[in-house]
Amino acid sequence: MQNIRIYIDKLILISCILVSVCIIAFHLSYGFEDIGVRLQEILNKAKKSALEPILESSKLSSLQKSMFVKSGFTMSKEQLELGKILYFDPRLSGDKRHSCNTCHNLALAGTSYIDNSSANPQKLNAPTLYNAIFNDVAYYRGAISRLDKADKNTTNFLSKNVLARASLHALSASNEMNANVDKMIAMIANSDEYMAYFKRAFGSKVKVNADLISQSLAGFIMSLNTFSRYDDFLMGNLRALSLEEAQGLELFIDKGCVACHNGINLGGTMQPFEVMRKYQFSNIGGLQSDADKMLKVSSLRNITLSAPYFHNGGFEKLEDAIKEMGQMQLGIDLSNKEIKQLILFLETLRGNLDSINLPNLPRM
């Protein structure tokens, strides 16, 4: 009898353990399912809010090539290598000391700290060139736009090729490369090593001109795209973001940030500036919005790496910039908890880019 009693007690104990395990498993499964439902809800909300992931490789390649129709630029390996050389070459500038990378430093998320010299009287903060292919305009006042009906600077580019036209402008702009373009072309044409790169990229009969230089620069810049966990999430991978990060995205949408920071680049378009009140550092540099009270919206991709913030670098800390945006653009005071939650989301916009080897510059 005692043995039977012990056997029954063991059965009861085992039954209790099995029931407990089942209950725990049920709650765990329900909990995970509940998180999955919330993440899917946030993903659906993001898709309805004009937020888009970076294009997958084949579509991105088609977009890149479509911007060079009838130009002879095909985004070939040789053309991109030439573009990289031009990007890092300071000898193209007027003082032979400034390359594109000086202001748009690829080791600093494609930007740099404010140049406080007389060459930058407006104290402009160099915007990142990563993912710049997805911007609709170039320059803070939208001087170059995809919406232009005609290209005022050159006859050989489609008006939609913002980066090629911006590169062309930058070559001679006094606050950028400040070069004598004719002398630059002559310098390249007189270099056998430089011409060897141009011939590999465009054929043995190539003639170097400003359009070709700016196309090559633009092509290289168009290759600088950073896929992030945020893109993975928008493509349907619910595990790419934690629930807390996704809730930061939801807060970003619900508070109205997405009204200006939308599209693939979460920026890159012209939008109203100083909507609810004046920007507290508007006096720095003196740059004003355009005639329609609009300024170019900076991309939020890699934003946690690209301090300082705003067109004149008024804020060093991202949390201060977010607080200012809430008050100035939305007329709301974001709590410290909300700001931290938004930063959790913004961290997911940090993308990956293959390492870039510095080129050996051709002899002149």
Image (cartoon, grey):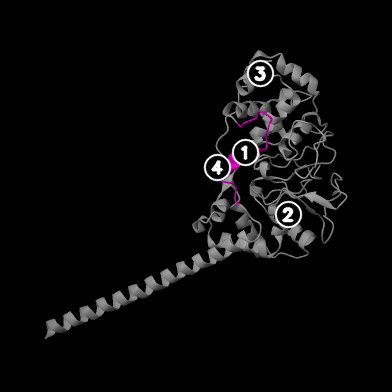
Tell me if label 2 and label 4 are in contact, CB under 8 Å.
no
Q: Amino acid at mark 2?
A: Ala
Please state the extent of the stretch shown in magenta in the rendering.
53-75
In terms of sequence position, does the residue under pointer 3 or pointer 1 come before the other? 3
Say how many tags the image has: 4
At x 57% / y 51%, what residue is drawn? 231
Rendered image quadrant of residue 275: bottom right
Structural distance between the alpha carbons of marks 4 and 3 = 30 Å
Comparing 154 with 45, the one in front is 154
322 displayed left or right of 272: left
Q: Depth-wise, is mark 2 or mark 4 nearer the camera?
A: 4
Structural distance between the alpha carbons of marks 3 and 1 = 23 Å
14 displayed left or right of 84: left
- Percent x, y of residue 211: 74, 27
Q: Which residue is mark 1?
A: 224
At x 75% / y 35%, what residue is drawn? 165
Tell me if label 4 and label 3 are in contact, CB under 8 Å.
no
Task: Report crowding for label 1: few under 14, some 14 to 19, many 20 or more residues within 10 A (C-alpha).
Answer: some
Q: Is residue 65 magenta?
A: yes
Q: Which residue is mark 3?
A: 194
In terms of sequence position, does the residue under pointer 4 or pointer 1 come before the other? 4
Q: Depth-wise, is mark 1 or mark 2 nearer the camera?
A: 1
- Residue 321's tag is 2
- Percent x, y of residue 150: 81, 39
- Percent x, y of residue 339: 67, 61
Comparing 37 with 123, the one in front is 37
Q: Residue furthest bottom?
A: 1
In terms of sequence position, does the residue under pointer 2 or pointer 3 come before the other? 3
Structural distance between the alpha carbons of marks 2 and 3 = 44 Å
- Residue 57's tag is 4
Structural distance between the alpha carbons of marks 1 and 2 = 26 Å
Tell me if label 3 and label 1 are in contact, CB under 8 Å.
no
